[in-house]
Amino acid sequence: MASIAIHVEEEEEEAAAASSPPPPPPPPSAQTSQWIAAQDLLRRRLIERDDFPWTLPGGGGGGEALKYVGGGGEALKYVGGVDMSFAKDDASLACAALVVLDLATLQVVYEDFAVVRLEVPYVPGFLAFREAPVLLGLLEKVKSSAKDICPQLIMVDGNGLLHPRGFGLACHLGVLADLPTIGIGKNLHHVDGLTLSGVKQLLEAKDNFSKDLLTLTGSSGRIWGVAMQSTWNTSKPIFVSIGHRISLQTAVKVVGMTCKYRVPEPVRQADIRSRDFLRKNGYIC
C-alpha cells in the first residue's frame, strides 16, 4: 500500500470531541451490571492468538504459511462481513446483513438479511447485547443453508479489543460463534489515553510520514490495535483490533488483502447491502 500524510478537515464539533476526553460513565444500572458480569464471563473464553484451521494465500505475506497446529492447512477462501443499518425514522428498526466474499476475487458469493425491531436499548459499551443475537442468527442460517460457503473468518463493523471495556462486538460475536473475528472501527474509542487528535498527530509526525500502520499503544503500555491507512487515496484511517481466535498481525494482513477502498470489502458490502435492503423494502435510511 502506498502512503500519504493524513490531512483531514474536521467540523468544529468533531475536532472538539476528538481532543476532549469522554465524560465519565454514569453509575451502572441493574441491567448494565448484568451485562458487565456477562462480558466478564465471555472474556475468559477470548483467544488473542492465531487459532484457525486454514492458511493465508501466499503465507500471508510473511514468508511462512499461517496455520493452526491442529488444522489441515487449506487456504482461507471465504471471508464474511456483518453490519447493521437502521431506519432513519425509527432507531429501533434495523436490517442486519451477512455477506460472504471469495477472498481471491472479493466478489460476494452469499448474502442474507434480517429486518428486526431491537428491544434492547443502545447503551455505549454494550452494543453487542443489542446486535449480536441477530448476527448470530444469520451465521446459524448460513451454516445450515449454505455449508459449502460458510465464512471461515468474520469482519465486524465494530470494535474488538479496542473498546472501553476491552470486549467489543467483534469479541462478543467471535466467542459466541466460535469463529475468528476482526474488529473494523471507523471511529476511535477514547481508551487508555488514546484520542483521535493524538493519533492523527502521530500519523502526521515526520517519523511516521511514510507508514501505513500506527500501533495503538495506550498509556498503560497495552496494545489495543492499529490505525491503518488502508488505501493510497484515503485520508482517514480505519482502526483494526483483535476480535477472537486471531492475532493482530494476522488480522492486519487479512484486512490488507480485502481493501479496495478505505473500508474492507466484507464490511463495506454488508453496509451497502443492508441499507439497500431497507430502501427496497420501503424504509428510509
Image (tube, helix red, strand yellow):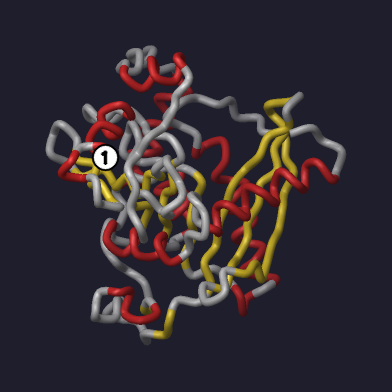
Query: Residue 52 at what x, y percent from top left?
Result: 36, 72
Q: Which residue is mark 1?
A: 203
Q: Residues within 10 Å of mark 1 (few under 14, many from 20)?
A: many
Indicate the quadrant where residue 99 lies.
bottom right
Query: Residue 113 at what x, y percent from top left?
Result: 72, 53
* Quadrant position of the C terminus in the picture: top right
Name of the residue lying farthest toward the left: 221
**Taking 6 as reference, is 144 above or below it?**
below
Q: Toward the viewer: 48 or 58? A: 58
**Taking 82 as reference, is 39 above or below it?**
above
**Taking 80 as reference, is 198 above or below it?**
above
> What secondary structure is marked by label 1?
helix
Q: Name which residue lies at 15% across and 44% down.
A: 207
Q: Name which residue lies at 35% across and 39% down.
A: 6
* Quadrant position of the N terminus in the picture: bottom left
Amino acid under disc 1: Leu
Q: Toward the viewer: 243 or 237? A: 237
Q: What is the tally of numbered marks visible in this picture?
A: 1
Name of the residue lying farthest toward the right: 282
Indicate the quadrant where residue 205 lies.
top left
Q: Name which residue lies at 67% across and 73% down.
A: 146
**Taking 213 as reference, is 8 above or below it?**
above
Query: Residue 194 at what x, y percent from top left?
Result: 25, 30
Q: Toward the viewer: 95 or 279? A: 279
